[in-house]
């Protein structure tokens, strides 16, 4: 595998693993220092708004200063914010106010780092001479591994080492990610300024200051495919967020079997790993529409099982199917975004998408909580499953989702206030892998070129 690809995947995995470790270690540290179980929820709630703003404004900075550069800056900032926890604790002693302050600082870096790596994906595929679908599938597989192994490693470390040592290890991970990204060639992810001919006389959108923030919204709204993908992503978060954060913990707590919660979440993570590996291996050889429909079917059947809150083995099977569907959808969405979004606006578009999913996550959890309190756990679970079915039907019928294998002639206005350039390509063939050698296939004829 090309070293560019190895460095990128290494950076992404290190960052994801660090996030998984700190997600377990931080609540532990907050409770140890404050003695207040609700303090962890307070820290998470207060840092949600800065994370949302960082996702939104971070996209503009990514398009202005470059994807590789902003990825390095964000990872270094994340490392410093995590390292500040034990450092400040040793000097001043941590209290709730300091936890909130450092949590806000960390939130300002984490999401822009993720967005920068999302925007880097097509650059790495091009520079590393690897099929974009395969790269996205491998990346999603590493996410599933971190989702599965990270909390387990953090839990084991907390039993063997002081909490401060675990926090320091979590700070090393984003620093390592920044190191790996810095080893990428400087030209990878560099902002390419549009010439006068390319922009048709319009200024480069990346140079338009804060007004350029609206470009991301306009590109998504004016593309039927990108709009459908964004709604699908939002729907997925509205379903999976409450399921993992509230429904399953409450169900197993009421059943008096909290240990089974970890097994069911692991079943979903294993499904994600299997789905993403399958995507990496098969996506370049089969229709993306087939992948998309298979993913929707797995998620829908899995959630239909979960909706009945059956005994453990059936519930684990349902979550395994949900994981497989998520593993197939996970890499497909960024690939489609990468192919349809103009390079000069990639950071802002992906920043808008990340901001949207961040914004709806707490709303979904809150709505599920109200349903549980006002009706019952089973009603809340049935509503969650039914909501996903509605999202799935919309995604199947959406005009932009009917042909996913060619870049259709769907021009997107990227300028400000009605002025700018139109970006669109008609029937652009995608790279298809054949016996480990990339080749271009014209989807209209099936012939190689």
Image (cartoon, rainbow, N blue to C red):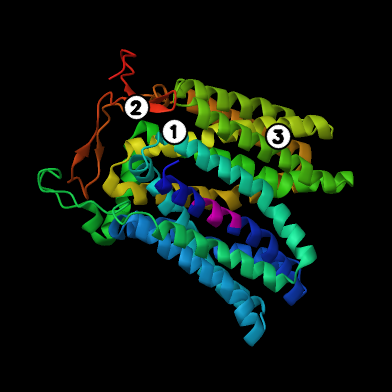
> Mark 1 falls on what kind of element?
helix
Outermost residue to the bottom:
91
Give the quadrant of the C terminus: top left
Q: CA distance from mark 1 to mark 3?
A: 25 Å
> Mark 3 falls on what kind of element?
helix
In this image, 205 relative to 285: left or right?
left
Quickly name the residue at label 3: 319
Please rate how many residues cluster around mark 3, counting C-alpha atoms within 10 Å: few if below 14, some from 14 to 19, many from 20.
Answer: many
Whether residue 285 is visible to the viewer of this picture, yes or no, is: yes
Outermost residue to the right:
256
- Is disc 1 in contact with disc 2, using a CB cutoff of under 8 Å? yes
Residue 133 — which label? 1
Dot 3 or dot 2: first in sequence order is 3
Q: CA distance from mark 3 to mark 2?
A: 32 Å
Whether residue 234 is visible to the viewer of this picture, yes or no, is: no
Q: Is residue 331 magenta?
A: no
- Is disc 1 in contact with disc 3, using a CB cutoff of under 8 Å? no
In this image, 104 relative to 427: left or right?
right
Residue 87 drawn at (x, y percent): 61, 80
Question: What's the magenta region?
Answer: 12-17
Dot 1 or dot 3: first in sequence order is 1
Which residue occupies 31% across, 44% down?
A: 218
Quickly name the residue at label 2: 430
Residue 427 placement: quadrant: top left
Closest to the observer, 385 or 87: 87
Which residue occupies 51% across, 65% down?
A: 175
Q: CA distance from mark 1 to mark 2?
A: 10 Å
């Amino acid at each position: 595998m090309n070293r560019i690809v190895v460095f990128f995947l290494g950076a992404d995995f290190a960052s994801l693993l660090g996030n998984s470790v700190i997600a377990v270690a931080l609540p532990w540290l907050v409770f140890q220092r404050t003695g207040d179980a609700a303090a962890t929820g307070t820290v998470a709630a207060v840092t949600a708004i800065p994370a949302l703003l960082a996702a939104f404004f971070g996209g503009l900075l990514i398009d202005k200063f470059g994807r590789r550069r902003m990825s390095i800056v964000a990872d270094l900032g994340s490392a410093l914010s995590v390292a500040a926890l034990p450092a400040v604790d040793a000097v001043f002693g941590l209290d709730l106010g300091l936890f909130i302050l450092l949590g806000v600082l960390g939130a300002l870096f984490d999401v822009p780092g993720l967005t920068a790596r999302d925007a880097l994906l097509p650059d790495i595929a091009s520079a590393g001479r690897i099929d974009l679908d395969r790269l996205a599938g491998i990346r999603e597989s590493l996410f599933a591994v971190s989702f599965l192994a990270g909390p387990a490693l953090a839990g084991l470390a907390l039993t063997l080492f002081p909490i401060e040592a675990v926090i320091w290890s979590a700070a090393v991970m984003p620093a390592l990610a920044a190191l790996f990204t810095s080893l990428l060639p400087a030209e990878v992810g560099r902002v390419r300024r549009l010439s006068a001919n390319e922009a048709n006389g319009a200024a480069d959108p990346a140079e338009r200051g804060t007004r350029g923030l609206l470009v991301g919204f306009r590109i998504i709204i004016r593309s039927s495919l990108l709009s459908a993908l964004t709604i699908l992503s939002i729907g997925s978060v509205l379903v999976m967020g409450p399921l993992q954060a509230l429904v399953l913990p409450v169900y197993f707590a009421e059943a008096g079997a909290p240990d089974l919660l970890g097994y069911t979440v692991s079943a979903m993570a294993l499904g994600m790993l299997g789905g993403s590996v399958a995507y990496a291996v098969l996506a370049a050889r089969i229709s993306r529409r087939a992948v998309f429909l298979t993913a929707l079917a797995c998620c829908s059947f899995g959630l239909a099982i979960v909706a009945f809150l059956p005994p453990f083995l059936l519930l684990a099977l349902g979550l395994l199917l949900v994981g497989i569907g998520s593993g197939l959808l996970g890499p497909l969405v960024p690939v489609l975004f990468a192919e349809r979004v103009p390079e000069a606006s990639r950071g802002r578009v992906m920043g808008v998408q990340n901001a949207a999913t961040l914004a709806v996550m707490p709303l979904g959890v809150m709505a599920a909580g109200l349903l549980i309190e006002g009706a019952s756990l089973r009603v809340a679970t049935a509503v969650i499953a039914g909501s996903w079915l509605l999202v799935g039907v919309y995604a199947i019928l959406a005009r932009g989702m009917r042909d996913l294998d060619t870049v259709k002639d769907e021009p997107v206005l990227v300028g400000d206030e009605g002025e700018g350039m139109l970006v669109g390509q008609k029937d652009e063939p995608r790279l298809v892998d054949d016996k480990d050698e990339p080749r271009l296939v014209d989807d209209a004829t099936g012939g190689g070129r």
